[in-house]
Image (cartoon, rainbow, N blue to C red):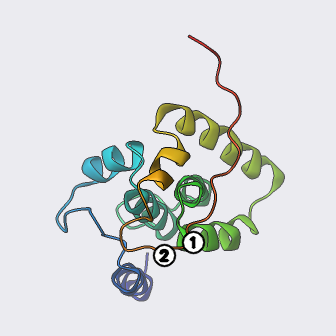
Amino acid sequence: MNLSRIAAVMVLVAALGVLGSIPARADLGTIRREAMRGDVQAQLHLGILYEFGVRLADHDVKAVVWYTLAAERGSKEAAHRRDLLSAHLNASEKTKVARAVAALDARMPPASAALANGPPKGGSSDALPAAPRSPQPSQ
C-alpha cells in the first residue's frame, strides 16, 4: 500500500469521526468485539479498515459486509459507502456478502434494538430503517 493511500485513509477516518465510542488506541480485537455487539461506529470503522486495507488485507467483500450491518443499524455513511463499493462487486461477491451478513446478523443484537436506543453515536438523527430480517429458526 502506498503512503498516499494510507494518508487518505487517515484523513477519511478523522473526517468521519468513526472512532465514536471506540477508544482511540483500541486494538483490532476490541473493534471486532464491539462490532459484533452491534456497535454501529465499530461496524463502520471495521468496514473502512477492510476497504482501505489499514491493518487488514484489502478485501472489498468484507468491507461491504460491515457497511451493510452498520447501515441496517442506522448509519447513513455506511449505507453510502456500501452502495459505492458494492457497485464494483460481481454476482459471486454479492452472494458472499449476503451470506456473511445473514450469518453475522444472526449472531448480534437485532438492528431494531440498536435503532430503539436512538441514533448512532456521532451519526445522523434521521437513521435509516432496519433492513428486513429473515425469520430465525426457533431453538
The relative height of residue 84 versus residue 15 in the rendered view (above or below) is above
Residue closer to the observer: 53 or 73: 73
- According to the picture, the residue beneath numbered tag 1 turns out to be 76
Please, which residue is most extreme toward the top here?
139
Which quadrant of the figure contains the N terminus? bottom left
Label 1 crowd (10 A; few <14 / some 14-19 / many >=20): many
Picture quarter with the C terminus: top right
Label 1–label 2 contact, CB within 8 A = yes
Q: What residue type is labelled 1?
A: Lys
Q: In which quarter of the image is residue 86?
A: bottom right
Residue at (38% x, 86% y) in the render? 15
Task: Locate residue 43, reporting x and y percent.
Answer: 44, 57
Residue at 46% over, 58% down: 57
Percent position (x, y) of residue 107? 48, 32
* Above or below 41: residue 98: above
Q: Image point 65% across, 17% down: which residue? A: 137
Identify the amino acid type marked 2.
Answer: Ser
- Disc 1 or 2, which lies upstream in sequence? 1
At which x and y percent is residue 120? 42, 64
The quadrant in which residue 63 appears is: bottom right
Label 1 secondary element:
helix
As helix, strand or loop, the secondary structure at mark 2 comes to loop
Residue at position x 58%, y 52% in the image: 65
Residue 28 higher or lower than 126, as above or below: above
Which residue is under mark 2?
Answer: 124
Q: Say which quarter of the image contains residue 79.
A: bottom right
